[in-house]
Image: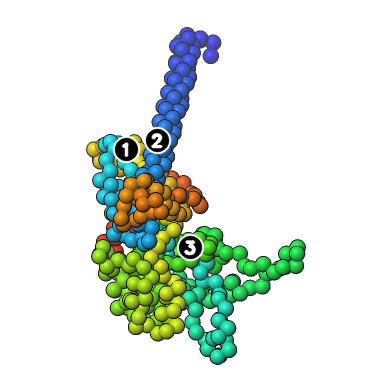
């Protein structure tokens, strides 16, 4: 115990060990900070790139030169699909963009219970109204998607509930639904069903979206609305054929009436109110990936997805050039102009548009049109 030989060596080894631990810890902290800084830069690049993708989609959306109707066969829509599909930036950076026609979906707020007309009430008739057909369509969809088919009945009760009078003694109406998420929360729709429902349902003010665009409605919506009673499935086939035919696409409500001609009177009347040929709401989407392995050996990257809901309105301005097809008062050409009103935007991590199995709304394939045949 009294022998102190070698104590200096022990002290040196202890100091070296402590210094080694400190250096390793410092090196790890520096590397971690570098990774964080690099990821932050990549994340910011992905976010800015996704915003650029939204601007790209909006620029194509503004190229529409026919405000009378909107369809998959329009030049701007087809050009957008080609542009986004072949978009190349760099080996380590990727971008995809997409547009969904929100007007082709069933607006849940259109299921609000309507009053019978005075003439029908006097005659004791119980003619079905468009809200009834839309609730039947929801039942058809929910049955196919394995969701509680009693929800449409509860939705009817929701619209019919009594509300408390306000400070002026007036009884306000029931608040409309503001989102699919709110609808799911109120009526206990399973969360895992939401991605599929978002493709066919929306929740927008009826003053903005009071119809379904028959030219852009997915096959599920067409079958659910037009053939929920098990009839008129041939009408759906005719509509789907015309959706992809540039020469036969629906250009007016009169063209819709021609297809609905053989339906029962009340159903035909309701469908003529439900369907239109115009679109006013679009959801613009863009996904960006940065820090991608150019060799493709290592999957992944830093992803960012932006989703923007816009309302598009049309206008005209004179270019001063003569055009016999679209004359104005001064004899010049009238150029279509568009204004966009931002209604909602969402940001999410990950590059959703790059996931396998994405439903491409830009140019749906024949297989996509024929899926979910249980709706027929």
Q: Is residue 304 visible?
A: yes
Is the residue marked by circle 1 packed among few (<14), some (14-19), or many (20+) residues within 10 Å? many
In this rendering, is residue 136 above or below 195? below
* Label 3 to label 1: alpha-carbon separation: 37 Å
The residue that appears at 53% across and 89% down in the rendered structure is 125
Left or right: 56 as drawn, with respect to 210 = left
* Label 1 to label 2: alpha-carbon separation: 9 Å
Cβ atoms at labels 1 and 2 below 8 Å apart: yes
First reached walking from the N terminus: tag 3 or tag 2: 2
Which quadrant of the view contains residue 222?
Answer: bottom left
Q: Label for residue 93?
A: 1
Q: Label for residue 209?
A: 3
The residue that appears at 41% across and 54% down in the rendered structure is 329
Q: Nearer the viewer, mark 3 or mark 2?
A: 3
Q: Label for residue 45?
A: 2
Left or right: 356 as drawn, with respect to 137 = left
Q: Nearer the viewer, residue 32 or 196?
A: 196
Q: Nearer the viewer, residue 322 or 156?
A: 322
**Residue 308, percent across and down?**
45, 50
> Quadrant of the image for the C terminus?
bottom left
**Residue 129, percent across and down?**
49, 79
The residue that appears at 39% across and 48% down in the rendered structure is 318
Q: Is residue 372 visible?
A: no
**Residue 374, percent across and down?**
34, 74
């Amino acid at each position: 115990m009294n022998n102190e030989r070698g104590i200096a060596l022990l002290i040196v080894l202890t100091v070296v060990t402590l210094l080694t631990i400190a250096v390793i810890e410092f090196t790890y902290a520096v590397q971690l900070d570098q990774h964080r800084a690099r990821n932050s830069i990549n994340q910011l690049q992905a976010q800015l790139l996704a915003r650029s993708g939204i601007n790209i989609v909006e620029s194509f959306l503004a190229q529409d030169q026919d405000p009378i109707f909107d369809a998959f066969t329009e030049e701007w829509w087809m050009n957008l699909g080609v542009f986004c599909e072949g978009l190349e930036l760099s080996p380590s950076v990727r971008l995809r963009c997409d547009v969904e026609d929100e007007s082709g979906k069933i607006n849940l707020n259109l299921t609000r219970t309507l009053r019978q007309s005075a003439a029908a009430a006097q005659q004791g008739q119980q003619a079905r109204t468009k809200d009834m057909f839309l609730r039947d369509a929801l039942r058809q969809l929910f049955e196919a998607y394995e969701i509680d088919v009693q929800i449409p009945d509860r939705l009817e009760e929701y619209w019919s509930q009594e509300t408390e009078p306000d400070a002026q003694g007036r009884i306000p109406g029931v608040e409309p639904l503001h989102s699919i998420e709110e609808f799911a929360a109120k009526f206990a729709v399973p969360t895992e069903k939401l991605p599929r429902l978002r493709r066919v349902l929306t929740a927008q003010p009826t003053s903005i979206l009071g119809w379904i665009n028959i030219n852009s409605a997915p096959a599920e919506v067409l079958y659910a609305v037009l053939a929920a009673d098990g009839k008129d499935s041939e009408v759906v086939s005719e509509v789907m054929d015309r959706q992809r035919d540039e020469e036969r696409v629906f250009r007016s409500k009169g063209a819709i009436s021609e297809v609905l001609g053989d339906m029962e009177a009340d159903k035909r009347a309701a469908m003529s109110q439900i369907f239109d040929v115009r679109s006013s709401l679009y959801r613009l989407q863009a996904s960006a990936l940065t820090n991608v392995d150019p060799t493709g050996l290592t999957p992944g990257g830093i992803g960012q997805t932006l989703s923007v809901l816009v309302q598009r309105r049309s206008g005209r301005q004179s270019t001063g050039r003569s055009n016999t097809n679209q004359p104005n008062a001064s004899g010049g050409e009238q150029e279509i102009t568009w204004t966009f009103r931002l209604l909602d935007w969402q940001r999410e991590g990950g590059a959703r548009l790059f996931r396998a199995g994405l439903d491409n709304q830009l140019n749906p394939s024949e297989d996509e049109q024929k899926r979910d045949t249980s709706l027929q």
